[in-house]
Structures are given as structure tokens and as C-alpha cells.
Amino acid sequence: MYRSTRGRLVGLAYLAPALVFVLLFTVYPLGRMAWMSLHNWSLLTPPVFVGFDNYERVFGDRQFWVSFLFTLKYTALITPVLIVGGYLLALLTAHNSPLRKVTRTVVFIPVVIGLGVSSLLWYWLFSADFGLVNRALMDLGLVDKPVLWLGVDADMSNLAISASVVWKVIGFGMILFVGAIQAVPTEVNEASMVDGAGYGQRVTRVILPLTLRTVLLVTLISVIGSLLAFDQFYIMTAGQPQNETATSVFYVYLNSFPYLKLGYGAALSMVLALTILAFTVVQLLLTRRSEV
Amino acid sequence: MTPRRFGRSGYLVGAVCLAIIAVMLAPLVMSVFASVKPTAEAAATPPTYVPHGISIDSYERLWSYQEGLPVYLWNSLATALLTIAFTLLLTVPAAYSLARFPVPGKEVIFVVLLLALIVPYQAMLTPMFLMFADIGLTNSLFGLAILHTAIQLPFSLYILRNSFGAVPRELEEAAIVDGASSWQALVRVFVPSSVPSIVTVALFAFIMSWNEFLGALVMMSKGSKFTLPLVLAASRTETSLGGTDWGMLQAGVTISVVPCVLVYLLLQRYYVSGLMSGATK
């Protein structure tokens, strides 16, 4: 339709605002981050070029590893629960009966509320003396004194925060799994039923293999999200005890803002961005392949 | 249609569904309950499940907390509305161009526009903060909305490009034959036939901006510019007389949650469709 030179110019004009915006607010900061990571810089002193010193420091920094390993531990704890749980919920509710639709809607509600706000909600529920989790556990006779869930022991905090995030995001995977399960052709399902396959066999031999791509995709999205965890730890433990629950993003935040080690914070950001990039590339390859 | 749908397993499925609904709703219901407990009961240990009395004390304390709730509500709402406006103003024309115009180097431009999908914004906050500090966009709702737009732009562009790409050529050609300019074709043909996608884009922009925490934490240092989640997070460590004001905190949680849940329930169809197409980006 608009094959002329004029069409090209008009097209470029429509693109220009978005392009300028992205160059200013995404590409430029990215370049600046790379530049900063090669400098020693706090807001108080002018930047000094230090080459790759900041990167060398990252790998020798004990807290970097504490944060990184804790983030991995959190990711390893929460991902299987989200995927298996989300898939089971999807199997349960994929059929469009009224009750199952309502269940789906309700399970999805926490996905639309903020992670910060849900963390404030669970910060109260898990509070040792004022929280309902301990009250319920004591009423059920499962514990006889209040459990110190948050900010005292790293593993306990990890467990409590993971539980809260599972509540918050499990509906995300579920909805995508429901979409994938509903897209399994009816004939395939019916054929396997005619062959006498029970429900369990249909799930493992038909439904699961046909929805595997979505499972991988949701797994990657969940892993990336967990590796970038911040809000829930900032709000529920503030990194305590002794920054043991300060995640990777939290450590970037601490260096850049309260500590004002901007160059070092930028180097940490670069390492984080590259870690995430690796996972994103896998994700994009997975989706790309399916579109062909 | 499963043959066993009305058998014993049907009741079992029903019971499991009801149990799941109860578990998922319980935290939200408990939060609302906590927010309407009278002051003394809200601070009681051990806590009560169901309020013994109903009061709006916690809401009153929140209303006048520091700068006052209206200020924080306004900050959150204005940022979210600006984010919707910026996102649509930038991505509607850009998506139109990508869907219909022979722009040279289109693929490269598209990749650049989607860059924020690959680089997490959490990793870019330090340079963005410095840049915003230079140009006076920290402690500014306008600045925060720009950050939120940068986060939301790739998703929106992707959704709208697909939607515009699916508009039948005949509709467009008919408009051009009638003498419409490309701009008129956009306004009269493309936008009206892509209303669901535009709603989806606005909805996601609203929910993201209303809820976003880390970027706001970094950009806003003045209390008077805090968004709702920021002031609530700050209030949790703010020790008034008896430590954290749990009733007020849950009143704040309730107020933050209500718009998201309402918007979601009203526009569920758009939300789910956006999620489906966005996740398979």
C-alpha cells in the first residue's frame, strides 16, 4: 500500500517517537551502565577509570556469592512448586464448568495485585506474635510456641517467603497451562480414550507431551522472575539476618543506593544482566522454534 | 466431555475446587478483617481470626498518616494514568508503522524497541537514576511514569503490532480510496478495530505501574512523592507507640488491592488474552 519513498518516510515518522524514547531511556542507560562499570565512582568524587577492576572485585566479593547462592536457592525451592502446582491446578480446572472457571478466576486474583503489597500482607501473616500463621499452627497443635519465620534464620525466611510468592504467582503458570491443555486437539484426546487409556495415562502420554513447550516456557519465565527477586525480601526480611537473605538484585540496590558505590553497583548489574540474558536467549529460542 | 463427570470423582473435584478457593481467598479476607478491627484488637497477641467489633479506626489513621492517604493515592494513580497515556501515545503509531509500512531496517528497529525484554530493568536502575537526577526527573511522577513506560513498552508494542497486522487489508484500502490519509486510516480503521488490544495494553500498564515497587523506591526519596506501596513499606518499620501498626498496614493493603481486583474482574477477558499472547512473545 505505502511502497513509495513517501510511505517509508511516513512509516519512519510513526516509529520515531517510540524509537527516540527507547534510545533515550533504554539504550543510553545501558551504555552508561557499561561505562560506569569500568569506573570507580561515588556521587561525591569524580569517576576514575579502573578497567575491569570492578568485575574482578565482584568475583572475590563474599557478599556477592552469598546473595547469588541465596537467590539460586530461592529459585530452586520455588520453581518446582510453581510448575508442578500450577500444572496440577490447570489439569483440575482446564474443563470449562462453572465451578472450575470460578476456581481459575480466584487462583488468578493474587497475580494482579502487587508483589510489594502481597509481601506486606504476608509480612503480617508471618509475624511471630501478631500473625495468623502462627496462631493457626498453635491452634492446630502443630507448634507450641510462635515460630520466628522472618529475618532470623535464612532458611526459614526462604520457606515463608516462597510460600507467600507461590500464593501470589501460581495462577500465572496455571492460566498459561490451561490455555495449552485446552489447545490439545479433542480428537487426540478422544482417540486415546477409545484406546482405553485412563486419565493418568492420558495426562502422561498425551497431554503432558503436547504441552511440554508451554511447561518449558513457564519454567523459564519463573526462573528469570525468581532470579530477579527483590520486593518480597526487601519488605519481609530487609535482607536479615546479616544480609543472608539479600538477593542479587537487593545487593545491586544496596551498593548503588545506600552505599553509593555506583561503579561497583554497575558492574554487579552487568553480571546480573548477563546471567538473565542467558536464560532469556533460551526462552526466545524456544518460542521462535514453535512459530515456524 | 469426560464420561465420569457426574460420578463420585465429580464431587471430589468439586470439593477440591472449593478448598482451593478457600485457601486462595483466605489471606485477602483476613487482611480485610484485620483492617476493620478496632485499634486494640488489631494490635492484640495472639491475633483474632474474625473481628469482634467493626471499626474504621485503621482507615482513619491511614487517611492522616504522614502526608495523608490522598497524596499517596494521587501519586499512584497519576503515575499509572501517565504510564497508560505515554505507552499508548508511543506504541500505537509505532505498532502501526511496524505492521503496515515498508520502513528500511524494520527488523533491526523492532529488536531495538524490544531491548527491554532482554535486559531486566532491575539491572538498569542505577544508570537510569543518575540520568533522571541530571535532568530533574527523580521525585517526579512524570519521571516515574517514564520509567514505567520503558518497562511496559515492548509488551505493548508487540501486542498492538500483532493486532494491527490482523486488520483486513480491504478495510484499510477502502478508507484510502475514500481519500483518507494514513493518519485518518489509523484513527478511523485501525484503532477502532483493535479496541480489545488497546484495552489489554492499558490494563497491563495500569496494573504494572500501580504495583511497581523497586523503581519507585529508587526514584522517589521525598515522602511527599511516595506511591502507595512505598509509604506502606516505610510504615512497617515506622515505630509508633506499640511497634508496627498492623491494622493500618492491612487497611493500606486492602486499599491497594481493591482497584486491581476490580479492574481484573471487570476486564478478565482482556487480561487473560494479553497474558497468553504476551508470554509466547
Image (cartoon, rainbow, N blue to C red):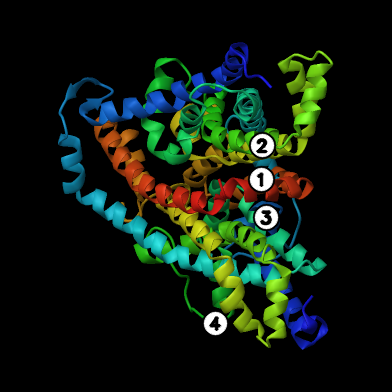
The mark nearer the N terminus, 3 or 4, is 3
Vertical comparison of A8 with B87: above or below = above
Kind of residue indicated by mark 1: Gly
Res A109 label:
3
Q: Nearer the viewer, mark 1 or mark 3?
A: 1
Query: Is the same chain shared between marks 2 and 3?
Result: no
Specify whether A54 is left or right of A284: left
Disc 1 marks which residue? B274
> In which quadrant of the rendered image does the N terminus of chain A lie?
top right
Q: State yes or no: discs 2 and 1 in contact (Cβ < 8 Å).
A: yes
Tell me if I can see residue B33 in this picture: yes
Residue B176 image-quadrant placement: top right
Kind of residue indicated by mark 3: Ile
Give the distance between the C-alpha atoms of the residues marked 4 and 2, in whole angstroms: 48 Å
Q: Nearer the viewer, residue A151 or A18?
A: A18
Label 3 secondary element? helix
Kind of residue indicated by mark 2: Val
From the top left corner, tell me how far across and down residue B147 is, in percent.
51, 29
Q: Nearer the viewer, residue B112 or A10?
A: A10
Disc 2 marks which residue? B201
Q: Nearer the viewer, mark 4 or mark 2?
A: 2
Give the distance between the C-alpha atoms of the residues marked 3 and 4, in whole angstroms: 31 Å
Mark 3 surroundings: few (<14), some (14-19) or many (≥20) residues within 10 A: many
